[in-house]
Image: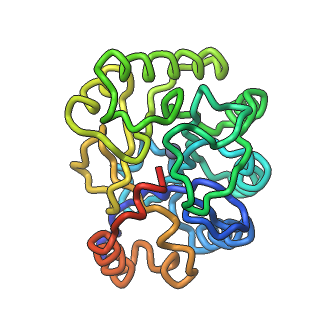
Amino acid sequence: MKPARPFILTYHSLDTSGSVVSLSPDMFRCQMEWLARSRRLVVPLQQIRETPGGVALTFDDGFRNFFQHAFPVLQRYGFPATVFVISGYCGGRNNWPTQPRNAGIPMLELMRWSEVEQVARAGIRIGCHTATHPSLTLLAESEIECELATSRAAIEDRVGRAVDMFAYPYGDNPPRVRDAVGRHFHLACGTRLAAVSPAADLLDLPRLDIYYFQNQFWFEGLGKPYGAGYVAARALLRGMRRRFMG
Ligand SMILES: [Zn+2]
């Protein structure tokens, strides 16, 4: 049988609120246990295009509950992962100006720099998710440049290595945004719901938001024919919700 297309999973917060950006820590543990048991190839994000059947794990926004709940589990299984942090909010909360109100998203702490440094030292890759989490499409060229350059420099300063991966807030990446991102980073992730093809654009890698895979049946369908059908159906039905899941 031909190996399934690889895919990238997007997690945000691991908490029990049930919000659109939340997955419970228990569910996360079950998912990682299943990936380990089923011997899925969990690979670094930068290798995903070339790894048929592979899975890459990404975490947007750098929530503190990544440090508390995901990091120990990833360490236990030896799974690589990438965390996209917002340089201007490390140690703060998810109250950036574009955070939708009345969307039921709880106010949550984000990792402190000392925690970002600690997970980076342990092998977690730190990517960039801007300085203030704006929708880059609404900004002038100079503001986009400022968001990208200041956040990349701040993170590189802390983790002591080049930061070459980026995640677009809200997945917004029209050509002028993508061009600017391409001047700073090798690879960038969007929010388009699809598996990764070998020819996928490195500056707009599709990802599967875990919101759609909280049910273990659908999670275990990833990489199987029934799972591929489900991904295609969800991609079609996806509406307003994406605005909340940046
Ligand atoms: Zn985000």
Quarter holding residue 53:
bottom left
Asked if 71 appears above or below 26 in the picture, the reply is: above
Number of numbered markers: 0
- Residue 116 location in percent, x, y? 70, 32
Quarter holding residue 221:
bottom left
- Nearest the viewer among 237 and 6 is 237
Residue at the image point whose x is 52% and y is 65% from the top = 210
- Nearest the viewer among 34 and 119 is 119
Asked if 123 appears above or below 214 in the picture, the reply is: above
Asked if 231 appears above or below 80 in the picture, the reply is: below
- Nearest the viewer among 26 and 133 is 133
Residue at the image point whose x is 50% and y is 16% from the top = 150
Colour pattern of the rendering = rainbow
Locate the N terminus by quadrant: bottom left
Residue at the image point whose x is 55% and y is 64% from the top = 20
- Residue 9 location in percent, x, y? 48, 58
- Residue 166 location in percent, x, y? 44, 34
Instruction: Tell me if 53 is positioned left or right of 22 in this view.
Output: left
Asked if 194 appears above or below 127 in the picture, the reply is: below
Instruction: Tell me if 109 is positioned left or right of 44 in this view.
Output: right
Residue found at the far front of this picture: 102
Instruction: Tell me if 60 is positioned left or right of 25 in this view.
Output: left
Residue at the image point whose x is 47% and y is 72% from the top = 212
- Residue 111 location in percent, x, y? 72, 38
